[in-house]
Image (cartoon, rainbow, N blue to C red):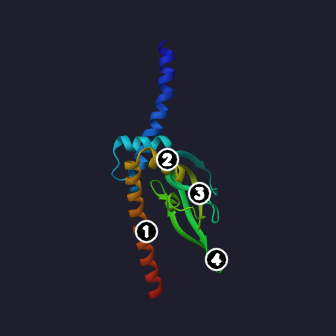
Amino acid sequence: MATKNAFWNNIFKSDSNESSHTILALKQVPIFDGLSNRELNSVSKIVHHREYDIDEFVFQSGTPGLGMYIILQGEAVIKGVKADGENIEFSQLTSGDFFGEISLISEDDRSANAVVVSPCKLVAFFRSDLLDIITRSPKLGNKILLNLATVLGSRLTSTKDLLTKMDAV
């Protein structure tokens, strides 16, 4: 009987480890700031775990944006193409970073490529997941939306500042 219990305990232990790693990752992302442990646990149950190899696209420019990604392990870059055809790297991302969050509220196609540069483990949080949360738990959904608006506003300000500096050069 002890062997049988050990078997089941090990199965559930790995689930518990993945869940606790996911919750720790969510706590690092400003979109999930201020969520209680219970709320973080609810979100951790609906996110999706993905693994990517080097040179794989997480998403490509021109494809529908479905949601955001959090890097648990590994590295990725966000790249685009200038009007003159030159490739440009917008950002380098590593463990704890998140990207693609505008797709939580916009159904527009992606405007850049996300490419893996070292094997990655990601957590994906899709628009459909957010809409489900809003339906089932409006208070939690509103917290996430307010945080998302704050993040997007901050990134918009940073982009404006960068463009202003570029114009000054």
Where is residue 102 shown, x and y percent of the image? 50, 62
- CA distance separating discs 3 and 2: 29 Å
Instruction: Say what amino acid the circle numbered 4 marks.
Output: Glu
Secondary structure found at label 3: strand
Mark 1 surroundings: few (<14), some (14-19) or many (≥20) residues within 10 A: few
Task: Work out whether residue 144 or residue 33 is closer to the camera in this orientation and state it.
Answer: 144
Mark 2 surroundings: few (<14), some (14-19) or many (≥20) residues within 10 A: some
Q: Which mark is on residue 155?
A: 1
Q: Which residue is mark 4?
A: 86
Going from the N terminus, do you reach mark 4 or mark 3 first? 4
Where is residue 107 shown, x and y percent of the image? 57, 61
Q: Which residue is mark 2?
A: 132
Instruction: Say what amino acid the circle numbered 1 marks.
Output: Arg
Q: Can you say whether 124 is above or below 15 in the image?
A: below
Label 2 or label 4, whichever lies nearer to me, is: 2
Residue at (53, 53) in percent of width and height: 127
CB atoms of marks 2 and 1 within 8 Å = no
Q: Which mark is on residue 116?
A: 3
- Give the side of residue 20 with respect to residue 102, left or right: left
Instruction: Say what amino acid the circle numbered 2 marks.
Output: Asp
Going from the N terminus, do you reach mark 2 or mark 4 first? 4
Label 3 or label 1, whichever lies nearer to me, is: 1
Q: Can you say whether 85 is above or below 109 in the image?
A: below
Q: Is residue 169 visible?
A: no
Going from the N terminus, do you reach mark 2 or mark 1 first? 2
